[in-house]
Amino acid sequence: MSDKGTYTPRPGAAPLPRMLRAQTGLETRMVLRNGEQLLLTVVIPVLVLLVFGSVEVVDLGSRSERLDFLVPGVLALAVLSTAFTGLAIGTGFERRYGALKRLGATPLPRGALLAAKGLAVLAVEALQVVLLLVVAVLLGWDPPDSATAWAGALVLVLVGTGAFAALALLMAGTLRAEATLAAANLVYLLLLVTGGIAVPLDRFPDAVRSVLELLPAAALAEGLRDCLSDGAGLPVGPLLVLLVWGAVGAVLATRWFRWE
């Protein structure tokens, strides 16, 4: 302010943390206000848990054994639905309509824009995890009381989120929006059945199982089972599988992602 009642304009971009918070809030609200996204990220995982946990659709033993298998798998499904399918479809259509290109031309750096999308994914996942754990406990699931087990599960969720997000951006940045929509939903359905989420991997032939165990969904589901059902710490094998998928997806997305 130069004189009393007179203001000197100071044009310029807002500080990066403020821009990042604002964009993260916008991305999160967009997901929560989208009915199709809520169906994918909230309704379907809860329905899978309720149906497979209450009815013996697949022979998984007693009710407690069934829940010990299903709860970690459904948590993996929640990460898959938000960090991969939802992110891929949303980013693909933003790219098609030119919104991604315009956002990339704003003072918000492109790296910060992608970071905001990642933070929004984590915010939605936090809501998913709380809801699914509440439903699981109401169904009779006995959660582990080991802090090491929960810490290992948290690391797996974070690493799995990064891996799925990298693959989502690779798909959304290279395919047409319609192709991304079809491919992301197809992958979601295939991994729901073959990713060790609702059907145990040991129900598949050994040759097929050895391949399925290398999928990121199976690694996340089995790793979470080691932590939340067996009370173990961070499992090395599933963690390495997720790290490899995340590294490969990130490298390819960085190289081939197109903003328009």
Image: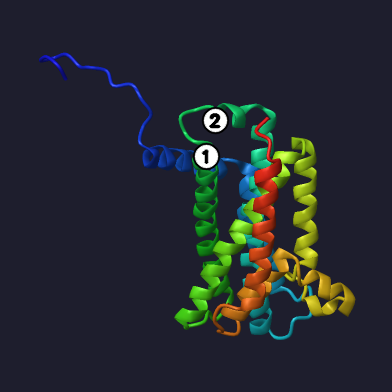
Q: Secondary structure at mark 2?
A: helix
Give amino acid for label 2. Leu
Q: Is residue 173 left or right of residue 208?
A: left
Q: Quadrant of residue 97?
A: top right
Number of residue marks = 2
At 68% from the left and 53% from the top, the residue drawn is 249
Please give the residue where the numbered disc 2 appears in the rendered image.
103
Q: Which sits in the foreground, 181 or 63?
A: 181
Q: CA distance from mark 1 to mark 2?
A: 8 Å
Mark 2, other Cα within 10 Å: few <14 / some 14–19 / many ≥20: some
From where the camera sits, is residue 57 visible? Answer: yes
Pointers 1 and 2 in contact (CB under 8 A)?
Answer: yes
- The quarter of the picture where the N terminus appears is top left
Q: Which sits in the foreground, 41 or 170?
A: 170
- The quarter of the picture where the C terminus appears is top right
Give amino acid for label 1. Leu
Please give the residue where the numbered disc 1 appears in the rendered image.
113
Name which of mark 1 and mark 2 comes first in the sequence: 2
Q: Position of residue 47 (x, y in %)?
A: 67, 61
Labelled disc at residue 166: none
Q: Position of residue 82 (x, y in %)?
A: 62, 53
Mark 1, other Cα within 10 Å: few <14 / some 14–19 / many ≥20: many
Q: Position of residue 162 (x, y in %)?
A: 59, 57
Q: Is residue 256 left or right of residue 41?
A: right
Image: 113 above or below 236: above
Image: 15 above or below 65: above
At 78% from the left and 57% from the top, the residue drawn is 189
Q: Is residue 54 left or right of residue 210?
A: left
